[in-house]
Image (cartoon, helix red, strand yellow):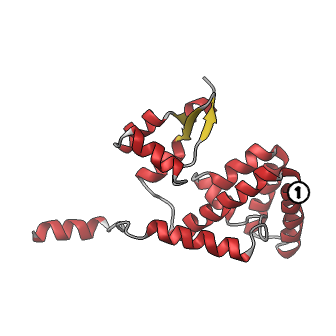
Amino acid sequence: MTTLTRELLTTGQAAILLRSSRAHVVDLCLRGLLPYVRVDGLRRIRRTDVEALIEPGLSRDAMESLWLHRAVAGKIVQNPPALLAAAAINLRRLRRIHPDGPAWEWLDRWDAVLDEGVEAVLEALTSSSEIAVRLRRTSPFAGILSEVERRSILLAYAESRRGHARRMPVDQVERILRSV
């Protein structure tokens, strides 16, 4: 079993981890809230994406960035050569702007991701992993989305968060429980 196969879950396995029904997992996939791929015609979900739903460890900014970069990934799928070339041009521009310093390491990492090809780029753009979150902070995909697309995505993200409970610090929960 390859590493990739172990990282991909069936909708049933995702449902067990999420403590929900398989139908709920399928609904999350169809609504675009849980990314998936098709393997032999069946939905497969990355373990990291399921874990991100269980324990959302991403900040609001990181989630907004993830939503924006998922839209960029959709555009890359439509026209890989042109968009990867645009990213390479942006990467060279970022190197001129940041000739040294901490951003340089991440620009080197983007160089490596771009050299690996479309699959690696899509993984970096859509993953909830810590390394992908940090990579997206120095994204060479600026300008790929129009301002209208960008605003629309951020509005959709804000709408998706409406009504979600905010996490409460543990000490505050304990204080509330003691007072009851």
Residue plotted at (51% across, 66% down): 59
Q: On the image, which quarter does residue 85 sit in? A: bottom right
| Position in image of residue 12 (x %, y %) | 43, 33
Q: On the image, which quarter does residue 67 sit in? A: bottom right
- Give the side of residue 137 with respect to residue 24, left or right: right
Return the residue nearer the eye: 100 or 86: 86
The amino acid pointed to by label 1 is Ala
Above or below for 127 versus 46: below
| Position in image of residue 61 (x %, y %) | 56, 70
Residue plotted at (12% across, 67% down): 178
Residue plotted at (51% across, 53% down): 31
Residue plotted at (52% across, 47% down): 29
Return the residue nearer the eye: 179 or 22: 22
The quarter of the picture where the C terminus appears is bottom left
- Give the side of residue 115 with respect to residue 1, left or right: right
Count the marks: how many? 1
According to the image, label 1 marks what residue?
A: 82
Q: Residues within 10 Å of mark 1 (few under 14, many from 20)?
A: few
Q: On the image, which quarter does residue 92 sit in? A: bottom right
The quarter of the picture where the N terminus appears is top right
Q: Helix, strand or loop at disc 1? A: helix
| Position in image of residue 66 (x %, y %) | 61, 61
- Give the side of residue 82 with respect to residue 148, left or right: right
Residue lying furthest left? 180
